[in-house]
Image: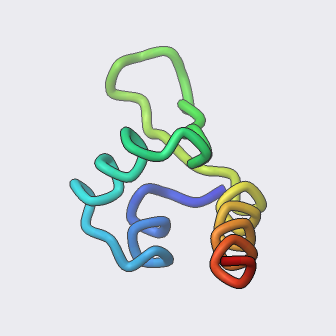
Amino acid sequence: MLSFSEVCSLLRKSRSGLYKLMASDSNFPKPIKDGHARSARSYFAAREIAAYQEAKLAGRDAA
């Protein structure tokens, strides 16, 4: 599991940039909440982020 900060570092995006990417790209993995409270931390599955990056690379190579 990756935190928001770790995903920002991996994708070289700011926190607001990551939120914009999440809003604009329907293929971007959805975060997983660690609880039901509004303030609960959110995480991303590392394999989903890796698969997203692989799909982007494959799309670039196909174009």
User: Residue placed at 48% from the left, 40% from the top?
Assistant: 42
Q: Quadrant of residue 8?
A: bottom left
- Observer-nearest residue: 9 or 18? 18
Q: Quadrant of residue 22?
A: top left
Which colour style is shown? rainbow
- Observer-nearest residue: 17 or 57? 57
Q: How far across and down, in percent of the image, does residue 35 sit?
A: 54, 23
Quadrant in which the N terminus is drawn: bottom right
Q: Is residue 43 positioned above or below 62 on the image?
A: above
Q: Is residue 39 positioned above or below 60 on the image?
A: above
Quadrant in which the C terminus is drawn: bottom right
- Observer-nearest residue: 9 or 53? 53
Q: Is residue 6 positioned above or below 3 on the image?
A: below
User: Residue placed at 44% from the left, 38% from the top?
Assistant: 41
From the viewer's perspective, tell me whether residue 52 is left or right of residue 9.
Answer: right
Toward the top, the furthest residue is: 36
Q: How far across and down, in percent of the image, does residue 25 sit?
A: 48, 46
User: Residue placed at 27% from the left, 59% from the top?
Assistant: 17
Q: How far across and down, in percent of the image, does residue 9 sit?
A: 41, 77
User: Residue placed at 22% from the left, 54% from the top?
Assistant: 16
Toward the front, the furthest residue is: 63
How many numbered discs? 0
From the viewer's perspective, tell me whether residue 59 is left or right of residue 30.
Answer: right
From the viewer's perspective, tell me whether residue 1 is left or right of residue 42.
Answer: right
From the viewer's perspective, tell me whether residue 55 is left or right of residue 12.
Answer: right
Q: How far across and down, in percent of the image, does residue 50 sit?
A: 71, 68
- Observer-nearest residue: 53 or 61? 61
